[in-house]
Amino acid sequence: MQDALAFDHRHIWHPFTYRADQPTQLVTHGSGPYLHTAEGRRIFDAISSWWVNLHGHAHPEIAQAVAAQAARLEQVIFAGFTHEPALELIAGLQTILHPNFSRFFFSDNGSTAVEVALKMSLQYFHNLGEARDTFVAFRSAYHGDTFGAMSVSARGTFTAPFQRQLFQVSWLDDPDNTDAETLVSQLQEAVQTQRVAALIVEPLIMGSGGMRMYSADKLALLAEVAHMLGIHVIFDEVFTGFGRTGELFAHHHIRQLPDFLCLSKGLTGGFLPMGLTVTTEEIHAAFQGEKSRSFLHGHSFTANPMACATAIASLRLLTGEACTLQRRQLAQWLEAAKEMLEKTPGLHRVRRTGCVLAMEVGESTGYLGNTGPVIYDWCLAHDVLIRPLGNTIYLVPPYVSSEADIQRATAVIRAGMAASWQPGTTA
């Protein structure tokens, strides 16, 4: 094991690391909500491995779907060709999405799903002969790490080296601490003074921006006003989709529909990369008729058959009675955990939406806050994996987690606070 980790430190560039010798866990296999390491540890994956794992690691039904598809067709160009797994996946999604969502564009991950939506919105107006060149987004938004997605994300640590390359955006204050009237006023001003193509939001929960949670009423009002002002609405449901907010999709909490829906993460149950940008027949029609109007965008692994097969299997599990019950129970267990964590000295703004529980430790100083990492180290040492966003701690467990798993994660966080937190400590 030591040789393997030494090799890793010499050659592999891990995301979000600043030291070549930063501690790394060697995972040998997964089972249910657990990761097993070469040292024989069993770690509770309380964040679903970056929010992607819905049904537990190495779920046999999904694993069998991958193996069966690999034996039939592993990859085919998706320009001019199609295949049954892609058709079956889209047919399945249509049973749980509104009928207005009739066009599905495949890509590779959440960031590229957002890129596609941004490009489609801009080109839609271009094809109609209208010059639109900017977007509206929340000030603490996060939509991905590619350049378009970064442009509509918060300016700060993630984007500072690339500031000159990012395009123009008009910002709305964050919806968790801004009243609806102010948000509407800011949106109206942006559209009146700039050539706005679309409003892009993470509906109900702003994930990497600090698990900021806001009401369905605000979301519905902003979508309604945006459409009244003649701009598109993009819902980035890369994180919030597939049951995380309590409903299958965050937009199911409201009546207003977006023009674009961005999906990834839970789409394949955490097995293989895939992104989808879902839109309407009206949007699609603007790209038809002449070659110059085409959407000239594609990825090498677009609609990969094995990824489609995993998504089909994951969707079948997600919509089954067992998973519906699991999600309902998990939400209840997280609510009980919330009540315990609210009593923990040093934790504040403890909040929950659906199957997502979040809290702050100390005074927030953004992503570089140094208190959250202390609790991360404590939890990992006690076989619970969390991944704080600065000083924001959160739980986004797989749906197969047990009540005992949630209780243990809660107890470990509370013990970590008791061991490391002193009154008056700041980040």
Image (spheres, rainbow, N blue to C red):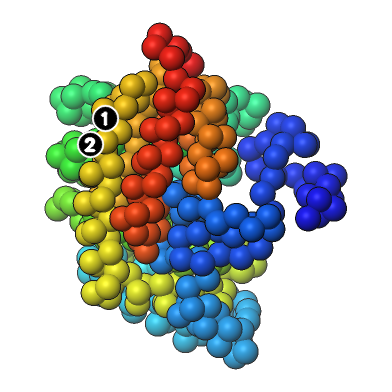
Work out whether residue 304 or residue 314 is closer to the camera in this orientation and state it: 314
Q: Residues within 10 Å of mark 1 (few under 14, many from 20)?
A: some
What residue is rendered at 78% in x and 36% in y? 20
Inspect the image, locate mark 2, and give the three-letter code of the amino acid beneath it.
Answer: Glu
At 40% from the left and 82% from the top, the residue drawn is 88
Which residue, as the protein is rendered here, is positioned at the far bottom?
72
In the displayed structure, would residue 228 be above or below residue 114?
above
x then y, percent, for residue 384: 49, 46
Q: Which residue lies under the disc numbered 1? A: 342
- Visible in this render: residue 237? no
Label 1: element kind: loop
Quadrant of residue 98 in the image?
bottom left
Quadrant, the N terminus: bottom right
Q: Is residue 363 visible to us here?
A: yes
Look at the numbered disc 2 and give the secondary structure of its residue. Answer: helix
In the displayed structure, does residue 88 sit left or right of residue 58?
Answer: left
Q: CA distance from mark 2 to mark 1?
A: 5 Å
Q: Name the residue rendered at 23%, 66% in the picture.
A: 325
Q: Based on the displayed image, in which of its 4 quarters is residue 337 positioned? A: top left
Q: Look at 70% across and 40% down and name the residue there.
A: 23
Kindly identify which residue carries mark 2: 339
Question: Of 136 and 337, which appears nearest the observer?
Answer: 337
Structural crowding at the residue carrying mark 2, measured as other residues with C-alpha within 10 Å and reported as few (<14), some (14–19) or many (≥20): few
In the figure, 290 relative to 329: above or below?
below
Where's residue 239, x and y in %? 40, 50
Residue 141: which numbered mark, if any?
none
Q: Are marks 2 and 1 in contact (CB under 8 Å)?
A: yes
